[in-house]
Amino acid sequence: MNINRRLMLIGIMLVVLSMTMATQYTSTRMTYRFNIVHPSDSDVRFIASDNSSDDGIRILRVSGSNASGSQGLELVIGGNISAGQNKTYTAAFGIVNEEPYEINITHINVTTTDTDYMQIWFHGDRDEQMEADGTSVKVWDKGSMGYGNGSALWILAAGDGEKDTMSADGLTQLDTAWDASANVRYSTEDSNNSASGTSDFVWVQISIDAAAAATTGAYSGNIFIFTRAGT
């Protein structure tokens, strides 16, 4: 009887041991794909408008040769600004949504190794300064955010995936033609005004507000634009 019990216990231990050692391995393959495209053709894309006073080319432009792998965007604000002077471009560039759902622009950040004299607004009227445009929202003010992280600074309405147009009302299509000098798409129509939540684009006003004690020299930095899907 004791022998049978011992044999039964040994059998149970062997079963348990075999269960702990019987690890299963599987292998599954899946494919993936995505596209790297030009910044003016992406799902959240950037278009030019105002010209730089340096060379008459759009402020927003491709910094490289426009060949694949060298299509970084830059803003050449241009002009020689003296201490205590303000220089403003009401439509330095535009942001257009081509996703089939709303996109919230949540916040802006600017980094520079120099003193920050940059001010940025989102607004609807391309050729009006922010003081005359009731839609304007200050999103950056010389080193500080206009809004905190997570706030919807501006809501870009759902787009239609068409990279050569944008829409103020979801119905009328406005052309965003190609500029061969700046290597970006652009729009200069004064009637191309936008509204948050209704239009799939927004205009970006940039001002350089130099302090009276500003040091002479060249200034540069980076602008980061953060978005969140509305759904």
Image (cartoon, helix red, strand yellow):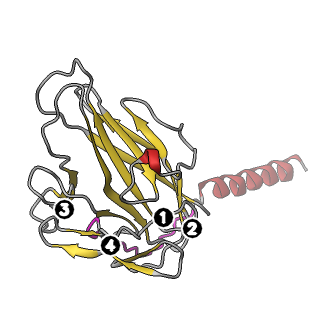
Instruction: Report the amino acid beneath label 4.
Output: Asn
Answer above or below: position of 9 versus 231.
above
In this view, the residue in front, 106 or 20, is 106
Q: Measuring 14% from the left and 43% from the top, which residue is drawn there?
A: 79
Q: Say which label, 2 or 4, has the lower sequence index.
A: 4
In x, y percent, where is residue 70?
A: 15, 60
Tell me the residue that label 3 is attached to: 71
| Mark 4 surroundings: few (<14), some (14-19) or many (≥20) residues within 10 A | few
Of tags 4 and 3, the one toward the viewer is 3
In this view, the residue in front, 109 or 153, is 153
Alpha-carbon span between mark 3 and mark 1: 27 Å
Quadrant in which the C terminus is drawn: bottom right
Alpha-carbon span between mark 1 and mark 4: 29 Å
Q: Is residue 205 magenta?
A: no
Instruction: Report the amino acid beneath label 3.
Output: Gln
Chain part drawn in magenta: 24-39
Q: Say which label, 3 or 1, has the lower sequence index.
A: 3
Tell me the residue that label 1 is attached to: 194
- Evaluate if marks 2 and 1 touch, with contact meaning CB atoms under 8 Å apart: yes
How many numbered marks does the figure carry?
4
Q: Secondary structure at mark 3?
A: loop
Tell me the residue that label 2 is attached to: 198
Of tags 2 and 4, the one toward the viewer is 2
Alpha-carbon span between mark 2 and mark 1: 7 Å
Alpha-carbon span between mark 2 and mark 4: 28 Å
Instruction: Report the amino acid beneath label 1.
Output: Ser
| Mark 1 surroundings: few (<14), some (14-19) or many (≥20) residues within 10 A | many
Tell me the residue that label 4 is attached to: 35
For residue 207, which quarter of the picture?
top left
